[in-house]
Image: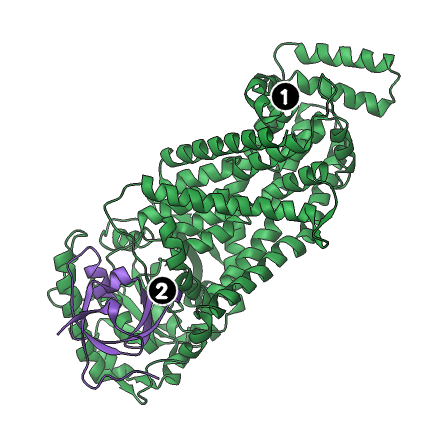
Chain colours: A green, B purple
Amino acid sequence: MKIALLGNPNTGKSSVFNMLTGLRQQVGNFPGVTVDKKFGVFSLANEEHTLIDFPGTYSIYPRSKDEQVVYDVLKNEEHPDFPDLAIVVADESNLERNLFLFTQVYDLQIPVILVLNMADLAKKNGKSINIPALEIAFPGAKIVETTARVGLGKDRLIQDIQSISKEKHTDRFYTSAKICSLDDSKGQEIEATERYTLINDVLIRVQTTSTTKTEASSNKLDRILVHPIFGYIIFGAILMIIFQFIFAFAAYPMDFIDGIFADFSAWLSQELPAGLFSDLISQGIVPGIGGVLVFIPQIALLFFFIALLEESGYLARVVFIMDRIMRPLGLNGKSVVPLLSSVACAIPGVMATRTISDWKERMITILVAPLMSCSARIPVYTLLIALVIPKQTVLGFLNLQGLVLFGLYTLGLVAALLIAAMLKLLIKTREKGFLLLELPSYKSPRWGNVGITVWEKVRVFVWDAGKVILAISIILWALATFGPGDRMEKAALKAENHAKELKLSNEDSERFVASAKLENSYIGIMGKGIEPVIKPLGYDWKIGISLITSFAAREVFVGSLATIYAVQEDGGENKRLIDRMRSEKRFDGTPVYTLASGASLMVFYVFAMQCMATLAVVKRETKSWKWPLIQMTFMGTLAYLGAFITYLILS
Amino acid sequence: MSKALSIIKPGQLVTVASIQDSALKPKLMEMGLIAGKEIRVLFRAPFGDPIAIDVHGYVLSLRLDEAGLIQVTESIGSEVFA
């Protein structure tokens, strides 16, 4: 049986979902749209049921991209996801507004169960519902009371799922109900007025309120959390804690994963029989997978904190206090989470923009999110900083290298905000942005829900980014392994002879040969091809190769340089690579990596859209190649000009 | 006499009189803001915008632009909420 799970936001819908399906959850797509379809399978008495979790809505008429799918599925009985049964989750402490959506679904005459959730909160607020009386008002539905956060009411809900008639019921709550078309706003307004009148008639009969206290305890906390001064201080402090975890503590598991893959790849190239296929595995696929998996600790930690803030109800307050600041920039209070996520990785950041109902504000958020310095830039930044920025303290206590790193992050943030303000003027739209947001009451988070969210995000990242990064690493491997005709073989032979003349050790001559081969591979030729373009930025063709390869993912830059300079990176220690880079000279004998060229490279990496996976996700989210291409163009231009100016000033 | 919700001070209890015709009107109504409904302005964000209102037991935040679409009348016996 196909079961649709519907409900307002903040009703504990996901708790009901988790209660019924546990960890047997999957994410797919609704046909034709890009909204994720979260569904889970559970079986009762040997019958399999699929529970589809629809986005939280206040009405079946959509007001955002996310909500559209509810309307699309429910109004069309031929739709492959049209449900045999609907479960509508309602917050018992706020029944009036929750019954609005329920009565709309009820009037579709699909078999329906009304779940009165958060029964505990309703009791605390002094509200109680006479369920038999409510059942009289809705003879076609079954009604069950739960507190899904702690798993209360599960058995009764399951009983109802099994015992409810699978035939459509014939009752209607709002007798003149029909589904209005989406552009019939007059019809929707009349429906809203009349439905609420009917709902209030029912509530007078079934609901008793023992206290006059309507404003919950949230109000006291809100006095501090949305306070003009303390509100921002607390938000700032929370951000600091999150970043401390993401950057300092995530480094240990990341090094561990990195080490495992480096060892595994080295072990494979020793153990596998020599040949092209073995090379593909040990040099293309395994490092490619490692390059994706290494980001899991950061992404998991970031989403752990975001889920925690969301579950507790605090995140809505962040949107509330940030909205006015973000608005002049063409952004929305809801842009804070996508931008924050982009500091770990732009892919989940771009996906998190779906909650922004205004098209223009959503588009601007997507376009600027990749300017936030993501974690893939860290290896590039740290290598270049160690290379060209002296280890010294300024003002007595500030570490200059750390200061530069901080500056690079700031540069990305400032660029994102400025570009957003420019895009606000450039992107035309007829509709005005809006923000209508429920501030849910504060709750202590359920760890199970947090854990499941983290698991989902990590899985989506590994699949979405993983596919692209893996594919591109294989392509890059091929471009670096093959060259036109026998050019590579000739170069290798020449290098071998040269190495013999120089009486190099076996190991050194192997590297010498590898370097010569790379120079004559397709990718080496490409690097030389773009040299005239990147020369004004202070780069040579070897850096050019790394710029091209890091299109797969930015951190590939470091690995490519290691290959080009034919040094081995041992255990994440870039020491030898750094020494080799320091001694790298141009034809005229000046060093390649100076303060000017190093800083120019850093600036380039702050701005450039060096990430195919992000482009692919932007394409998916905006449904056209237009936006990712615009994004790549303006980021590329910014990177080129920024790097050029930096080089000019510093040299 | 009705006023725009956007100029109502925190703590005041008001009644929705009407909503200006706009693309947002049906959405606002679905959120429970229908004529005759009593609402209380709870607090404002730093910089005075957006505002948070209590709509029969739930807290809704909206920008001043949206609040400006809503005409309200001051409820009888309305007092500033301490």
Q: Quadrant of residue A390?
A: top right
Which amino acid, by three-letter code, is at mark 2? Answer: Pro
Q: Which mark is residue A55?
A: none
Depth check, front residue: A613 or A428: A428
> In the visual, does A507 lie left or right of A224?
right
Residue A238 to residue A296: above or below: below
> In the visual, does A348 lie left or right of A10?
right
**Is any part of residue A204 visible from this angle?**
yes
Tag 1 secondary structure: helix
Distance between the Cα atoms at labels 2 and 1?
54 Å
Name which residue lies at 68% across and 20% down: A518
Q: Which residue is mark 1?
A: A541
Q: Which residue is mark 2?
A: A9
Residue projecting furthest to the bottom: A210
Residue projecting furthest to the left: A176
Quadrant where the image shows the C terminus of chain A: top right
Quadrant where the image shows the N terminus of chain A: bottom left
The x and y percentages for residue A143 are: 30, 75
